[in-house]
Image (cartoon, rainbow, N blue to C red):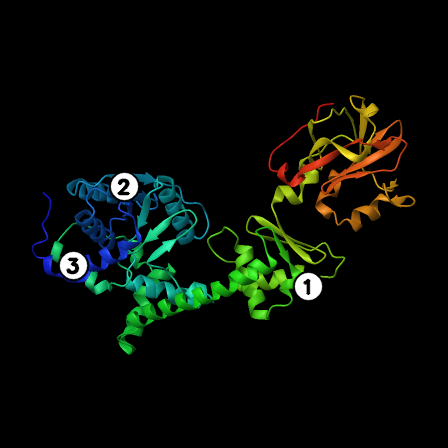
Amino acid sequence: MRRTLSTFNEVWQQQFRHRVLAQTQHFSEQTQFLIGCSGGMDSMLLLFLMSELFPTQTRAIYVDHQLQTMSAEWGHVVQQQSDALNIPCIIQQVDVAIGNLEQQARQARYQAYQQHLQSNEILVLAHHQQDQAETLLLRLFSGAGVHGLAAMQQIDIRQDMTIWRPFLDVSREKIEQWSQQLDFAYVTDPTNYDTHYDRAWCREELWDVLQKRFPKMQAAVARTSSLMLDAAEILDEVLQKDWQQCATDRVLDLIVLEQLSAARQRQLLSAWVRGADQYRPSYDMVQRLQHEVILAKPDAQATLHINQHYFVRYQKTLYRLTHDELYAEKLFSFPDTLSQQFDMGETINVAAGQFKIETQKIGLSSRLLGRELKLLKRQGGEKIHLYGRVGHWPLKKAIQELQILPWLRHTIQILVVDNVMLGVFSPKGFWLAQSDYLEQGGWQPSLISDCNDFFQQSFSYDE
């Protein structure tokens, strides 16, 4: 039978209902809620109260990490309570990867949340004031900066989901009081008391010591988190301006970066390296990027691997590359010699990218259209007489002058006919060579998109 709020009504009206409705002003009337419910007291209370406020907009999800023998039974408790409240419930088993158990379990749990979240749905979690204070202290012990000490946000808007924590400013004691008044069933996870885990140690060993000395410590630490959030927002405003001046998602201008203060350089590098990931790199990793890559000798081929990306400097620019982009020469090989025919208006794919055959003021003779030409892979030592320049240049010098990135130079191909160089395909376009095959109103290949767009997918050549 569904419980009533008769004994809880006064607390409900004064201490929870008003707070929740004020927070949900940020949401639309069509917003749905997915409650992450572990079966513990906090999340079961949240499930009960949300069923009262939003009975037709709420679902629950229990993530079974399969790490304890009782985990399936706990899911059954969540299912029973959800059924009693007429709330749809999802039971999702996950496999936790080997490694840091707390971190891997959390990652598996959030992947399950993301899998089931619908486009108009918000994830609702039961983190409370003590959770917030514990998070700040643990991050402080790990050397976190302002953003880390901001800890959790009540309404946390991310790229892949929005998280709402309606209990974040509610004390653990108040949650216990409300739970006793409502008298519902919940489960107790023994790992919550296993001091092998950092959070349990903080709660079981450290908390009483601190509160005995500082009785209002929990609220004070949580308030510090709010102040850090304000500071983080101010830093983000400065960071956004710096980002606009010298960075895109994949490229960072080191000349402009050097003009910033050391602190702003570190902030920008930390945020830029993070990219679309959830967490910023460690302070030590940012320092390694500065010393091993940015400040390396100009002729050094310095590369640093952070998470799934490689950070490479070329001249005064820092690049973010995937594994496939950096090692494309090994992954996307092509023959030393290829036969190729060209027709006016057609689009062709070569190693350097995608090109379109178009009419130009000066170009190659129309006699070459439809004729079998050769594409030769650059071997080294070639010379080119570029149209409009005097004399022959080493092709290597032209490549350096036009700043072709080192990891893209293997894509350069030379277009020839009867041992006469007609031009060179490069990631920055087609370089027309001086030859007897030039004419007014001739044709040239025009670059549409360079090879970076093609390294994300496998492509082949027709011989």
- Whichever of callouts 3 and 1 sits on the residue coming sooner in the sequence is 3
The residue that mark 1 highlights is: 295
The N terminus - image quarter:
top left
Observer-nearest residue: 377 or 392?
A: 392
The residue that mark 2 highlights is: 72
CA–CA distance in space, label 3 to label 2: 27 Å
The residue that mark 3 highlights is: 178
Name the amino acid type tagged 3: Trp
When asked about the image quadrant of residue 344, the answer is top right
**Secondary structure of residue under mark 3:** helix
CA–CA distance in space, label 3 to label 1: 58 Å
| Observer able to see residue 187 | no
Observer-nearest residue: 64 or 276?
A: 276
- Whichever of callouts 3 and 2 sits on the residue coming sooner in the sequence is 2
- Whichever of callouts 2 and 1 sits on the residue coming sooner in the sequence is 2
Residue 174: x and y, percent?
19, 63
Name the residue: 59% across, 64% down.
287
Residue 14: x and y, percent?
15, 62
